[in-house]
Image (cartoon, rainbow, N blue to C red):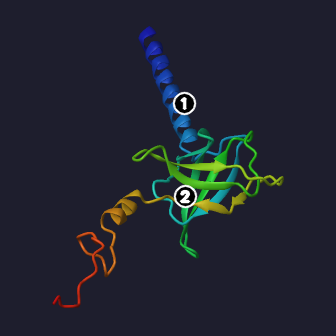
Amino acid sequence: MKNSMVETLIGAAVIFIAAAFFFFAYQTSGKGHASGTYRISAEFDNAEGVSVGTDVRVAGVKVGSVVDFTLNTENFQANTVMELDPKVKLTDDATAKVTAEGLLGSKFIALEQGGSETLLADGGVISNTQGAVDIWSLISQAMFANKGPGDQSAPDQGVPPSDTKSP
């Protein structure tokens, strides 16, 4: 009888720990709407590297995360919905841009405060956005840039061609 009771208690503890783990994972994944947060959205031309769970930062400090990420089929822009800490009060002229931690670092959305006095409410939209910069296309352009139709491989020596015959 004692072994049966001990096994039951251990089983209940395992189930409780598993349930707590799944609840924590659900809340931190961005699927669960955390209490006290508010949502804003923004549309980007290029949101490469952004997905559900991507950090949202102000001055390098995480203040929220992306909770929904879809394609707007009318204008073919990436629509992102972000959940932010209610202590962070953004103005209606705030700027959102997709940036990276370094040259090959992970992407995040950086928010910059504007100068307006009107605050964004829950469900507000940030209209000033800047999409992700494709570093590989920039490197490709720098390496394989067309030099133009008149360029030659040898630099110009400053000597004009001679059309006259010498006597």
Residue shown at 66% from the left, 49% from the top: 112
Quarter placement of the C terminus: bottom left
- The CA distance from mark 1 to mark 2 is 27 Å
Residue shown at 68% from the left, 63% from the top: 127
Q: Earlier in the sequence, mark 1 or mark 2?
A: 1
Quarter placement of the N terminus: top left
Type of amino acid at the residue the image marks with label 2: Phe
Q: Which residue is mark 2?
A: 69
Q: Quadrant of residue 41?
A: bottom right
Q: Are marks 1 and 2 in contact (CB under 8 Å)?
A: no
Give the label on residue 86, or none: none
Residue 32, placed above or below residue 73: above
Type of amino acid at the residue the image marks with label 1: Ala
Disc 2 is placed on an element classified as strand
Residue 161, placed above or below residue 60: below
Residue shown at 58% from the left, 60% from the top: 130
Q: Position of residue 148 (x, y in %)?
A: 34, 78
Of 128 and 140, the residue lying toward us: 140
Q: Which residue is mark 1?
A: 20
Q: Position of residue 149 (x, y in %)?
A: 31, 81
Q: Is residue 71 left or right of residue 161?
A: right
Q: Position of residue 30 (x, y in %)?
A: 57, 46
Q: Quadrant of residue 131?
A: bottom right
Disc 1 is placed on an element classified as helix
How busy is the neighbourhood of tag 2: few (under 14 within 10 Å), some, or many (20 plus)?
A: some
